[in-house]
Image: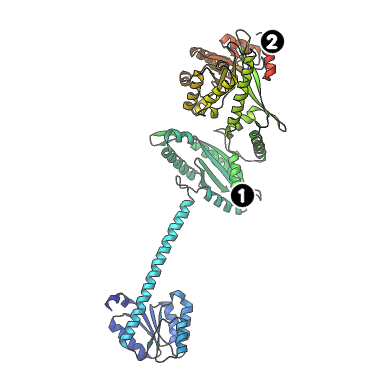
Amino acid sequence: MKSNEHLLDSHIMIVDDNPINVEVLQVLLQAQGYAQLQGICDPRQVEPACKLQLPDLVLLDIQMPHLSGQVLLQRLRAHWGDRCPPIIVLTAHIDESTRHQALAAGARDFISKPFNHQEVLQRISNILASHHSYKQRVSEASALESLVAQRTAEIQRQALREPVTGLPNRRAVIAELEQALVAPAAVNVAFIAVDAIDDIARLHGYPVTEQLIALLGRIMGQRLQNATLGCWGNAEFVCFQRETHAFPPFIETLQALQQALSRTFQVGDLRLGVTLRIGVSRSGHDSDYAEQLIRFAALALPERTGEPPRLFDEDLEHALQQRDRLHRALRSAVSNQELHLLYQPKICLREGRIVGAEALLRWEHPELGTIPPRDFIPLAEGSGEILTLGRWVLETAISQAAAWQRADLCQGDFTLALNVSARQLALPDLADEITGLMQIHRLESRFLELEVTESGLMDDIVQAGNQLQILAQRGVSIAIDDFGTGYSSLAYLKNLPVHTLKIDRAFVDGIAQNSQDRNLAKTVIAMARNFHCRTVGEGVEHPEQARLLKELGADTAQGYWFAHPMPAEDFARLCREPPDWSF
């Protein structure tokens, strides 16, 4: 029995209508070391006693007045279920049927009267040991179940959190917004885009970027305490708020947030600057659902940095539908042969003769009509379709230049200029593609000029520089378009093979009336001369502009005063029969 000493603290209830039997068992068990013994002679007191303190073992007489042991056994099992303590039936004599009924009701064992002391002690010890082992397993299983539940809850919590900021992630935001939309009050949703994050990641790495994003998340959380804030993407946040008051305060809060975060932040030893663009949508339709509202808010994002938060409305929705229709039509514009090139002459200001042309892309849709480049070029650049359009322009323009070369229209210093996008400049095989087209069409490289924008160069200055260097070595001229309106830098004039600077029409427009524009044009021309570059004045619409450009030393000019963009056959005719451009 020594090995079961831990069982001596067990609470044993003895139930027998004969006080002598109760006393005999108590004396026997006390002598064995059991200390928590409870004797009951009235079976009606058992259930209340169990409710006060549930024993570890019940010794139950089966034949008692007022309430039989059989009925009491059934009641205890029914009330306590799996928590019911083991029950040993005490009986002087019992028939087989009663024994089976007792076992069926849940009795664990039987002790016959008169009591055999060793048998009583052994049976009690066995049952207590078995019950203790069972309780221990249940306790361990319960502890394990609790641990699993805690870990599962933690995993579920982490699955709904963005790890860098600790904010609700996309899945959690959608779930919480769906729940908010159930309420009758309108819900305002804001989509917040943090600009410049990709540039910071490229320049300083992802650990620095994550520190900055975490900092921005904390500040947003502090400033949007009355709204639900979550992460949508790497540099995108979503917040929403039930409209319990007027709508303007929500916009005012977002404006204040935009002003507070559109600045530089200290991250380690670095000062990093970001800006915010914010789009807003509001619920109010039966068809509203979380992802739709978030999409509307994202679609309402202003296109330019620094603009105030913009609200999604029907006009914007219509414009976006038109934009989507245009985008879908753009995908098949090349295959449907809806594109064509026009050519605008470039005039030598000193001699008044045609020295080249710029190829300009035009789109004529059978249903939408003439679509201006300002509408479809940005769309093509954003979607990647610009690569398809760019290849078509290269093929078509080089083929046309080769035809003019064969017709002796390309002579001397004549060049045909093509616009090349930033995405094309990022292609590692752009130079080889252009060289291959010139070889196929047998075009001399000196007749070809590529126009690139300053912003296009800055997107990937190394890759763009490599491609332009190769093309320049093969005889192709390079021009900087809209010079002075973007990231003007003497560094790329020094390091890149630039042959021509195009003076932006913004300077040419006011050259006759505004001395500042005149001085800016003069500065660009002088700079170009110092770098041995030619200059082209864009957007000339009056003879006075042409005259002043000539006086300032510009080499060539183009614009509506000289000629509008025209089809190839009209340009060829103009070259053969040029007008008198006197200015």
Mark 1 crowd level (few <14, some 14–19, many ≥20, 10 Å Cα): some
Residue 457 on image: x %, y %: 51, 25
Q: Is residue 527 above or below residue 24?
A: above
Front-lying residue, 264 or 544: 544
Position of 109 compared to 472: left or right? left
**Residue 488 visible within the image:** no
| Residue 90 in view, yes or no | yes
The residue at the point 47 percent across, 43 percent down is 217
The disc placed on residue 579 is: 2
Q: Position of residue 364 (x, y in %)?
A: 69, 28
Residue type, mark 1 in image: Tyr
Regarding mark 2 in the picture, which secondary structure is present there?
A: loop
Q: Amino acid at mark 2?
A: Pro
Relative image position of residue 284 (x, y in whole percent): 65, 48
Q: Which mark is residue 289?
A: 1
Q: Quadrant of residue 255?
A: top right
Q: Secondary structure at mark 1?
A: loop
Q: Quadrant of residue 281?
A: top right
Q: Nearer the viewer, mark 1 or mark 2?
A: 2
Residue 546 position (above or below residue 91): above
Of residue 161 and residue 416, the one placed in the foreground of this image is 416
Q: Is residue 438 left or right of residue 41?
A: right
